[in-house]
Amino acid sequence: MQDQLTNLLPKLVVLIGGSGGILYWTLKKALEARFNEKLEKVKHELQLDLAKKSIVFDHQKDSFRKLLSAMHEAVESVEAKQVPDGGDWEPISMKPCERFGTMAAEESLFIDDETDRALRLFSNAMYDASYGPEHQPRPHEVWRAYRQMIFIQKRVTQHFRNVVGFEPAVLAPLHDVELLGACRLINRFHFPDFGMPHKGILSINDNNPPEAVVANAKGNRELLVSELEKLRLAMSRSPAAAGFWFDDIATVDNFLKRIQPQ
């Protein structure tokens, strides 16, 4: 628009005559001033937007550092409970779980939904390694939970590296965590009439580390979806279904949306 008006001005000068020269330069300067004013306004808005994004990105990187440090501390709290010289894995108290949960909640403002779900799964695995009034895990269960924590920690670390601009060594690392979470679900609940917990290739046991479970899930995605659908059906038909399984059914539905074969 600016260029079109500027190109029309010389033609106006010819039509108006000699006095048109003054009008030409007056209009040209007015248009230039108006254009420059708009340009400066746009530049200012872009600078403000960039500054806001820069501030958010800086806060996000701080959150990443704090969360990775908290995950490392959580892993060490489990490692510290292993009996020396390769002995049994003793459960941790709830205090490390509470500390990690508090840190994750404090930094949740600057993390994406995928990361939030991964941290929740990490927290759940950590809880599996802890003891409480209603939970007394055996040594092999602590070891199993520890391996899941390590797996999730590595994937979250890779995700953070991808976000801050490093060359991705693993594409979509948090999708692996989603698959592990789905497999945990079908191994968690007991519905014997529906063949639950799962006892096939997607089983989580001492001989099937998280890496193998996720690899099997990738290669047998239809089976995983089928098992989740079966679990949902079992919950919905449970005598205690009226409200009791509401949150768990919602969790199953969310996993089904995120892991359906493409």
Image (cartoon, rainbow, N blue to C red):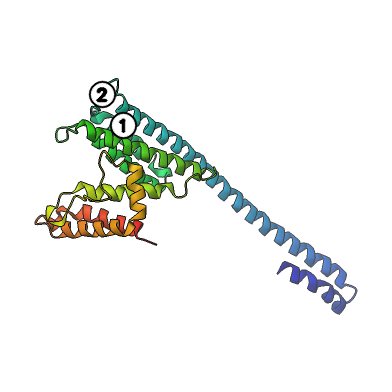
Q: Is 60 situated left or right of 49 in this image?
A: left
Query: How far across and how far down the image is residue 140, in percent?
Result: 23, 33
Determine which quarter of the picture holds residue 98: top left
233 over 134 or under it: above or below: below
Helix, strand or loop status at disc 1: helix
First-in-chain label (1 vs 2) = 2
Report the front residue among 252 and 190: 190
Q: Residue at x 24, y 60 (%)?
A: 229
What residue occupies the far right of the structure in this picture? 18
Is residue 190 visible to the viewer in this orientation of the structure?
A: yes
Dot 1 alpha-carbon crowd within 10 angstroms: few under 14, some 14 to 19, many 20 or more: few
Report x, y in % for residue 58.
51, 39
Give the residue at mark 2.
87
Q: Quadrant of residue 92?
A: top left
Relative image position of residue 237 (x, y in whole percent)? 13, 60
Task: Report the residue marked by disc 1.
Answer: 99
Label 2 near label 1: C-beta < 8 Å? no
